[in-house]
Amino acid sequence: MTTTSTTARPVRRRTAVALSATALAVCLGVQVGGTATAAPVSAPDAASVAAAKPKFQMPFKCNTHWRIDTWGHNPAIDMVVKGNTGSSGKPVYPGYKGKVVKAYKDSGAGNMIIINHGGGWYTAYYHLKDSATKYVKVGQTVTAKKQIGRIGATGKNSGNHAHLHYEQRYRTNGIPTEKHRKPVHFNGKSYTGKSKTWLDVVSKNC
């Protein structure tokens, strides 16, 4: 007659518990027999970054017409009035709500402003006509249609030609620089590509 061991079940239970603990440790990034470590976090892929991008509108009054050029600094763009009939002094807006994080004068970019729109997305505005703090201050929250400046030709990189140099940037850990520039989108449409021109783009910042 066969007898059943009274110690088999506890042993199996202890083994199962140990295996479960090991699996949990791996998921949580804990080194078995060592100290706890942070679980690895993968960087967001391009699709998820694009999906989280704010619905930026052009930084100008509703239903005004503009020319966009990428020239040699794609994905940054330059903008002037359609037909280039004179852009100096035209008001500039954020095109999306945000908070001003920088407003200063740069030797090349002239009077410039950087706005944080949340989710790692920022916009930058170069060559503004007036002092960068004339219309807004650092730390100020702005709406899409709050005037932040006027088109000008300040800074040695403007070529003394009134236009708005504009960038959309992405960075999740600090204020981004030019190396964090991303393709520009207005009203859901992309305006990017080396040395490309759009002769008549209508602002929908309405």
Image (cartoon, rainbow, N blue to C red):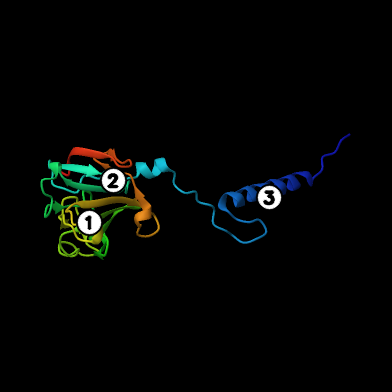
The reply to whether callout 1 and callout 3 are in contact (CB within 8 Å) is no
Q: Name which of mark 1 and mark 3 comes first in the sequence.
A: 3
Vertical position of residue 46 compared to residue 36: above or below: above
Question: To which residue does mark 1 refer?
Answer: 158
Residue 75 in picture, x, y percent from top left: 32, 46
Question: 173 or 165, which is in the foreground?
Answer: 165
Say left or right for 180 vs 85.
right
What is the secondary structure assignment of the residue under circle 2? loop
Amino acid type, callout 1: Ser
Q: Mark 2 or 3, which is nearer the eye? A: 2
Q: Name which of mark 1 and mark 2 comes first in the sequence.
A: 2
Q: Which mark is residue 18?
A: 3
Say left or right for 127 vs 63.
right
- Which quadrant holds residue 132? bottom left
The reply to whether callout 1 and callout 2 are in contact (CB within 8 Å) is no
Residue 194 in picture, x, y percent from top left: 33, 42
Mark 1 and mark 3: Cα distance apart in space? 67 Å
What is the secondary structure assignment of the residue under circle 3? helix
Question: 155 or 134, which is in the foreground?
Answer: 155
Residue 125 in picture, x, y percent from top left: 24, 55
Extreme residue toward the right, this view:
1
- Which quadrant holds residue 48? top left
Question: To which residue does mark 2 refer?
Answer: 71
Residue 137 in picture, x, y percent from top left: 20, 64
